Image (tube, rainbow, N blue to C red):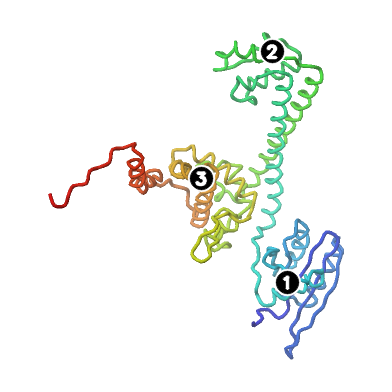
Amino acid sequence: MEPVVKVSAGLDVHRKNVMATILSEQDDGSLQEKTCEFGTFLKNRKQLRRWLLKHNVELIVMESTGIYWKAIYSILERAGRNVYVVNARHAKNLPGRKTDVQDSKWLATLARFGLLSPSFIPPKDLRELRLMTRRRMKMQGILSGEKNRLHKILDDAGIRLGAVVSDINGISAQAIIDGLIRGESPVKLMQYVRGRLKVKIPELLESLEGTISERHIFLLRQIREHIRYLEQDLMELDQYIIAAMSPYQQQWEILQTIPGIDQISAAGLLVEIGIDMKRFGSMGRLASWAGMCPGNNESAGKKKSSRTRKGNRTIRQILCEISNAARRTKTQFQGKYKGLVIRRGHKRAIMAIGHKILRIIYTLLLKKEPYQDSTVDYESLIVQRNAPRWMRALQKFGFLPKVQQACSAC
């Protein structure tokens, strides 16, 4: 193989140290190897940068191990070096070569021959915004857990409020729970009932008949205060994220034209995939990188599995939430869901819709055009394709009379 760079470097990054190896091709064709170990504090990172610049390294490669690579990447990025962060699976060592020195040398060797492709790393501003959007998702999960715990405490006390109200987190239910914490009677709590829930007042009175102790009240008070605190934090995060979208206003508004995507989910998608779709090359590569497309595993003409690969879990979670919202709209996504859910099930249908939405996002951001819903009726296409087979099956099992075919001699 012919090398594509003359001087390459491989970094084996850990929490406390970085093992670096430089492979440089000499004028006579020989290969010179230099290995050095550095710490991960700021002064050590600056020493690593000076050492790499001193040897005029053309390409630097490191594995995406946890979050430890981020500080190293940031300081090398500011130096204007060509840095690749690669998937560890793509750079897996051969058996019997598992040391830090061998790891860094192997990365430098692969980089020298151009056998590694870089992972997508968004610009610095979007990388920092990822911290905000991902923290919001984590806090949303904590908030949902606290609301479930509130429900369990009520059930433990024998109060079946959740069996009567459709949403225990609604305005009326929250006011009733706050009244329970203050020790008010069930009859007095009925003054907090609003809207259509008033017709269920007799059932509500029966559901509130329970044995609620001081310890139940103590836990309910703590959980309610924690829920209010989390909701306030989420509100502040939302305001910050929306304000941070001003440099990407055009792309952010384009994404919001797609059914099921609101301001926060549009921001989350932009932060994860960026605004430059040319980096991915095609919509298929974007879907593969995100782990949203079916896998390929075929041998000897037999298709063994179509399990999706491990990709960006954050994008997958956002797209699944969007798909669940989009399937309820009167758009092509509703027809596609109805056409798939019968034979593939809910989860696979949601993944298929998420895959389609991601491909649409690629096209819209590439052309910088808003979304326009097509007139494709996927449900009718499925029926047209499968109706003859369904009719034959119904006739076979006696649900429909068999059609008498005309004799050719008559």
User: Disc number at residue 330?
Assistant: none
Three-letter amino acid code at disc 1? Leu
What's the CA distance linking mark 2 and mark 3?
A: 42 Å
Residue 214, image quadrant: top right
Q: Secondary structure at mark 1?
A: loop
Three-letter amino acid code at disc 3? Ala
Within 10 angstroms of label 1, few (less than 14), some, or many (20 or more) residues?
few
Residue 58 appears left or right of 195: right
Q: Residue furthest top?
A: 187
Three-letter amino acid code at disc 2? Glu
Residue at image mark 1: 94
Residue 35, image quadrant: bottom right
Q: Secondary structure at mark 3?
A: helix
Residue at image mark 2: 209
Residue at image location 68% in from the left, 42% down from the top: 137
Residue at image mark 3: 349
Instruction: Tell me residue 259's x, y (percent).
Output: 50, 42
Name the N-terminal-most of marks 3 and 1: 1
Q: Is residue 223 above or below residue 305?
A: above
Closest to the observer, 393 or 226 = 393
Instruction: Tell me residue 155's x, y (percent).
Output: 70, 22
Name the N-terminal-most of marks 2 and 1: 1
Give the foreground label among 3 and 1.
Answer: 1
Residue at image location 79% in from the left, 64% down from the top: 13
Contact? badges 2 and 1 (CB < 8 Å): no
Q: Is residue 176 above or below residue 322?
A: above
Closest to the observer, 247 or 317 = 317
